[in-house]
Amino acid sequence: MQEVFNRYIFYLEVERNASPCTVRNYTNDLLGNYKRGSEKGFFQFLRLKEIDELGKVDKHTIRDYTSWLMGQNVTKTSIARKLSAIRSFYRYLAREEILPDNPLVEVSAPKLDRRLPSFLTIEEMVQLLKAPDLANHQGLRDRAIIELIYASGLRVSELVKLNLGQINFDSNEIIVWGKGSKERVVLIGEPATMAITNYINRGRPKLVGKRSGDALFLNRYGSRLTERTVQMILEKYAALAGLDKKVYPHLLRHTFATHMLDGGADLRVVQELLGHASLASTQIYTHVTKSQARKVYLSAHPMAGKDEEREKG
């Protein structure tokens, strides 16, 4: 099993060009995380059931695994993610003709409760943008990062992979390679363009080191920024801005999409800018904007709310 698994991980990294985060999650979901918590990995379950061959796994095994996870109070979201990892693994086994059948064909993931994505208000976004100190090079970098994610809706994995040559300052466009190495063009406005320009001219030269190459965003050692560092940067400025929300890179992506639709953007345009393969992935933001519209309506319309005096009359 271990040899086949190692080849699968190599396939994810090289042929599928999966992000380090995806590879890490799939590894934990299949092998299990031995550093914390009880055993919940798929292979750990197979050992528990004394199943020593991948070909012995059938739909009943998968359903037993799902029930086992539920018995350990694993959330529906986590179970769905683990089943997705197993499904991907068995698709690979079928593709390589290691196994003839995929036992997950007749197994569906648990129905998830649909949660609306969180986002920042315009006022909160302004506070966050004002937080970096533009008098130092790291502040210039961090302002450029925040401006860029908010202006473009980039995934953090796409942000940290950016090179200098991908930005066209004449047209305010950036060429991005997203999931599955799919190329798309994202647009940025003048504030983001200005913030990036200031960082490149005044901030980046003070961070450049031997390993910098053409990487756009650098850490203090001159290497390319990591996704985790971007997360820490946003947490830092959220605290400085006095925001009472957990701020993370994907929250700014949600904020971009929500503000675009609130401003009247066409859903398919937002889909293209976000790099969503399916329109269904983008449509969840229409629920957010409807929810926001309802709040605005109830607070703004003079006859929309409950009026105790009117009810008495």
Image: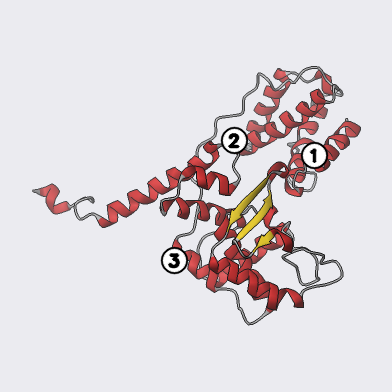
Nearer the observer, 198 or 299: 198
Residue 12 circle label: 1
2 or 3: tag closer to the N-terminus: 2
Q: Nearest the camera: 227 or 67?
A: 227
Question: How far from the left and from the top, in percent, is residue 1?
Answer: 88, 30
Q: Where is residue 293? Give x, y as percent.
A: 35, 50
Q: CA distance from mark 2 to mark 3?
A: 34 Å
Q: Which disc number belongs to residue 78?
A: none
Report x, y in % for residue 186: 60, 54
Please tell me the numbered disc located at residue 123.
Answer: 3
Secondary structure beneath label 1: helix
Spatial CA distance of label 1 from label 3 is 41 Å
In front: label 2 or label 1: 1
The residue to which callout 2 is attached is 76
Query: On the picture, is 57 further left or further right than 298?
Result: right
Earlier sequence position, callout 2 versus callout 1: 1
Kindly identify the amino acid type of the residue bearing the numbered disc 3: Glu
Going by the numbered disc 1, the residue's amino acid type is: Leu
Q: Residue furthest bottom?
A: 135
Secondary structure under the numbered disc 3 in the rendered image? helix
Give the residue type at disc 2. Lys
From the viewer's perspective, is 213 left or right of 142? right
